[in-house]
Amino acid sequence: DTEAVVRLAWRGVKPVNIDAPVKYLSAEEGGVSHFRYGRDNVLLTWMHTRLMVEFVLRLPGLLIRRLLKKPPFQD
């Protein structure tokens, strides 16, 4: 979930990329998509808009952290 990853990174949790095998089944194989084009795109756009607004509000703190040379992630 994109929002969860972004919020964890904001809290100082270092992201780790892990390859995950994925197989998309065709309709003949029993694959079913629950993606609803209009609704899901509106929800994704709303999520990205909220995250961008929060980022802009957090920007002064991020710049101060950079000036004080504090590490961005916890070890």
Image (tube, rainbow, N blue to C red):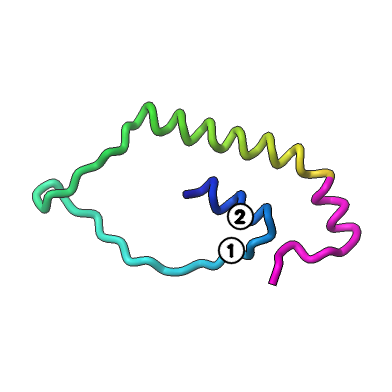
Residue 14 placed where, x, y %? 63, 65
Residue 63 in magenta stretch: yes
Residue 49 placed where, x, y %? 60, 33
Looking at the image, which residue sits at the far right? Answer: 68
Q: Residue at x 64, y 62 (%)?
A: 13
Q: Residue at x 38, y 28 (%)?
A: 39
**Residue under label 2:** 8
**Residue under label 1:** 15
* Location of residue 55 with respect to 37 vertically, above or below: below
| Distance of label 1 from label 2 (alpha carbons) | 8 Å
* Location of residue 40 with respect to 67 vertically, above or below: above
Using residue 66 as the reference point, say whether residue 50 is left or right of it: left
Residue contact between numbered discs 1 and 2, judged by CB atoms under 8 Å: yes
Looking at the image, which residue sits at the far bottom? Answer: 75
- Nearer the observer: mark 1 or 2; the answer is 2
Circle 1: element type: loop
Quadrant where the C terminus is found in the figure = bottom right
Q: Residue at x 58, y 63 (%)?
A: 15
Circle 2: element type: helix
**Which is more N-terminal, label 2 or label 1?**
2
- Say what amino acid the circle numbered 1 marks: Pro
Q: Quadrant of residue 57?
A: top right
Residue 35 in magenta stretch: no
Q: Residue at x 55, y 67 (%)?
A: 16
Q: Please tell me how many numbered marks the rendered image carries.
A: 2
Q: Quadrant of residue 70?
A: bottom right
* Location of residue 5 with respect to 48 vertically, above or below: below
Asked whether 26 or 69 is in front, the reply is: 69
Answer few, some or many: residues within 10 Å of disc 1's Cα (few below 14, many 20 plus, some between 14 and 19): few
Answer few, some or many: residues within 10 Å of disc 2's Cα (few below 14, many 20 plus, some between 14 and 19): few
Q: Which region of the structure is painted magenta?
A: 61-75
- Say what amino acid the circle numbered 2 marks: Leu
